[in-house]
Image: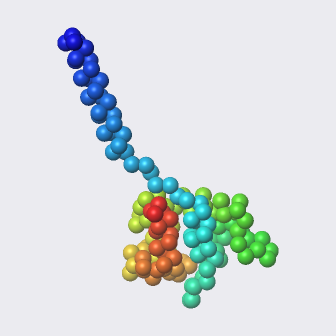
Amino acid sequence: MSARFIILFSAAAAFGAIAIVGGASIAAEPQLDFEIYKSQVEPVFLMKREGIARCYQCHVEANNPFTLQRLGEGQTNWTDEQSRLNFAVSSSLVTPGDPENSRLLIHPLAPEGGGDLFHSGGRQFATKDDLDWRAWAEWVGGQ
C-alpha cells in the first residue's frame, strides 16, 4: 500500500470513530406523552381536594400562562380536541426530563415541599410524595 493511501484510510477511520462516539453521546430529548398526560395529569385539574379549589375553577379561560379549556354544559371531561389544547398549554410549562424545574409541577406544590411561595388556588400538593404529583413528575420525566 502506498503511504498516501494509508494516511487517507487512517484519517477516514479516525473521523468515522469520532462521528460514532459523538453521535452516541447525544441523548434524545425526552418527549411528553399525550396519552399519559390525558390519563394521569389532566384528571387532576378537575379533582376536588379538601380545602382548596379545583385547578379548573381558577384556570378555565384564565388570564395567565396556564389556561384550561372550558367544559361545555353537562360535560364532565374534555373532548380529545380540548385535551390536546390543554396538553399544549401544560407542555409549555414543563421542561421535559426535568420535573424539579418545571413550573407546572412547582407552582401548585407547597413551599415546604419545594414549591413556590405563592399560589392563589391553594396547595394542590403538600409534598413531592403526593401520588398525583409523582404521576405528573413521571410524565415530565419521560418515565
**Residue at the image point whose x is 52% and y is 79% from the top:** 124
> Where does residue 82 sit, x and y in percent of width and height?
70, 63
How many marks do you count on the picture?
A: 0
Taking the view exactly as shown, the residue that stands out farthest to the bottom is 51
**Residue at the image point whose x is 19% and y is 12% from the top:** 3
Taking the view exactly as shown, the residue that stands out farthest to the front is 1
37 left or right, relative to 118: right
> Where does residue 23 sit, x and y in percent of width and height?
36, 40
> Where does residue 120 sit, x and y in percent of width and height?
54, 78
Observer able to see residue 95: no
Q: Quadrant of residue 78?
A: bottom right
The image shows residue 53, relative to residue 15, as above or below, that is: below
**Residue at the image point whose x is 53% and y is 58% from the top:** 32
107 left or right, relative to 13: right
**Residue at the image point whose x is 28% and y is 27% from the top:** 13
Observer able to see residue 74: yes
The image shows residue 43, relative to residue 35, as above or below, that is: below
Q: Quadrant of residue 101?
A: bottom left
Q: In this rendered view, identify the residue nearer to me: 3 or 25.
A: 3
22 left or right, relative to 63: left
88 left or right, relative to 11: right
Which quadrant is the N terminus positioned in? top left
> Where does residue 84 sit, x and y in percent of width and height?
65, 59
